[in-house]
């Protein structure tokens, strides 16, 4: 069940250049929401809404948090809103992450793929290792919040300006080698996700990935966001908005597998 309405923005902060955090008071959507689901957010002056993941859910205070980067005209228009304005959203949409209870997990995020994983870390706490990759120090977001949730937090940067230099897959391989991780949950650029899926296959660890696709409606009607999936050996198209955005990696088709 999702809601469609205008909800007051109660907090707006800038996390890095062009990356904003909005918190809206939205009691009913917050009550329904799970980590990994998303909202379709109306951009003032544009007909099509933009999909943005739910980064934080506070059921007690009835709030949802969104963290997004200005990529083009739509996100720029959303970023022009401020505290006291309303955010016109449809939420919560799609299938979020299934978080294994009482088991050690790893969340692996790249860049603006990090926000939906923060909600997972708030559920799993100390059972969660967060491996978070960014281009350089100036793009780092939310890492302190993962630490506050109790996660072991490993930061990687492409240029080594903070944390480990290089890709998130290096620390992930070391972690999986220990054999204590029961699942990997990932969100980020597609090449990163493909590398993670292949690595999890090698270590035989279940993996869930959140996919990003351009989408029109967000509720499964327009089929703009189709992606190739496989079940019982048969290929068919799924909708990222309705069947995802989070998929078990073994149902993904195309070149996701080794
Ligand atoms: C399920 C889902 C969850 C998402 N969650 C977040 C989030 O939490 N934070 C965040 O910053 N972004 C998120 N995105 C990406 C975000 O929707 C796009 O950046 C946004 O729609 C771009 O709109 P625009 O009008 O600003 O850009 P446009 O002018 O339409 O495009 C600008 C650039 O963004 C790229 N782009 C457009 N749409 C998408 C898309 N759907 N996915 C990836 N790249 C796109 C284009 O290729 C282009 O390079 C998510 C996307 C999906 C599908």
Image (cartoon, rainbow, N blue to C red):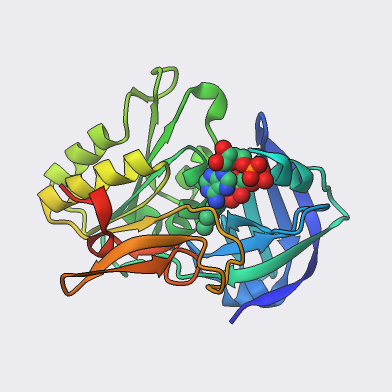
Q: Seen from this angle, which residue lies furthest bottom?
A: 1
Q: Nearer the viewer, residue 39 or 140?
A: 39
> What is the number of callouts on the image?
0
| Rendered-image quadrant of the N terminus | bottom right
Q: Quadrant of residue 175?
A: top left
Is 255 on the left-hand or right-hand side of 135? left
Residue 89 location (% of width, % of height) = 71, 65
Residue 221, above or below 77: below
Q: Is residue 191 left or right of residue 23?
A: left
Give coordinates of residue 148: x percent, y percent: 50, 47
User: Up-down: is 78 above or below 97?
Assistant: above
One can see residue 68 in this view: no
Q: Locate residue 215 relative to residue 186 in the image: left or right.
A: right
Q: Could one spot residue 62 in this view of the protein? A: yes
Within the image, what quadrant is residue 227 found in? bottom left
User: Does 209 sit above or below residue 59?
Assistant: above
Q: Position of residue 102 (x, y in %)?
A: 29, 67
At 62% from the left and 77% from the top, the residue drawn is 2
- Point out residue 36 in the picture as x, y percentages from the top left corner: 48, 61
Residue drawn at x 75%, y 43% is: 79
Nearest to the observer: residue 141 or residue 72 = 72
Q: Which residue lies furthest to the right in this view?
A: 84
Q: Is residue 193 left or right of residue 145?
A: left
Residue at x-position 32% and y-position 24%: 166
Vertically, is 111 above or below 8?
Answer: above
At x 13%, y 45%, the residue is 178
């Amino acid at each position: 069940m999702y809601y469609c309405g205008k909800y007051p923005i109660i907090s707006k902060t800038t996390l890095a250049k062009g990356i904003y955090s909005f918190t809206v008071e939205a009691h009913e959507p917050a009550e329904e929401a799970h980590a990994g689901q998303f909202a379709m957010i109306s951009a003032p002056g544009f007909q099509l809404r933009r999909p943005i993941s739910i980064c934080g859910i506070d059921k007690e205070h009835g709030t949802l948090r969104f963290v997004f980067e200005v990529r083009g005209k739509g996100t720029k228009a959303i970023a022009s809103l401020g505290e006291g304005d309303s955010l016109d959203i449809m939420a919560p949409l799609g299938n979020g992450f299934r978080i294994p209870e009482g088991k050690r997990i790893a969340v692996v995020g790249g860049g603006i793929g990090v926000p939906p994983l923060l909600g997972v870390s708030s559920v799993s706490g100390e059972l969660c290792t967060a491996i978070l990759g960014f281009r350089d120090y100036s793009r780092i977001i939310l890492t302190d919040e993962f630490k506050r949730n109790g996660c072991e937090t490993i930061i990687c940067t492409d240029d080594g300006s903070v944390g480990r230099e290089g890709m998130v897959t290096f620390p992930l391989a070391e972690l999986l080698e220990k054999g204590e991780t029961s699942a990997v949950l990932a969100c980020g650029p597609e090449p990163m996700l493909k590398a993670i899926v292949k690595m999890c296959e090698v270590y035989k660890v279940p993996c869930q990935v959140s996919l990003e696709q351009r989408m029109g409606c967000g509720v499964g009607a327009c089929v703009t966001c189709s992606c190739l999936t496989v079940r019982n050996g048969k290929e068919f198209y799924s909708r990222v908005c309705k069947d995802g955005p989070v998929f078990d990696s073994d149902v993904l088709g195309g070149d996701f597998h080794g």
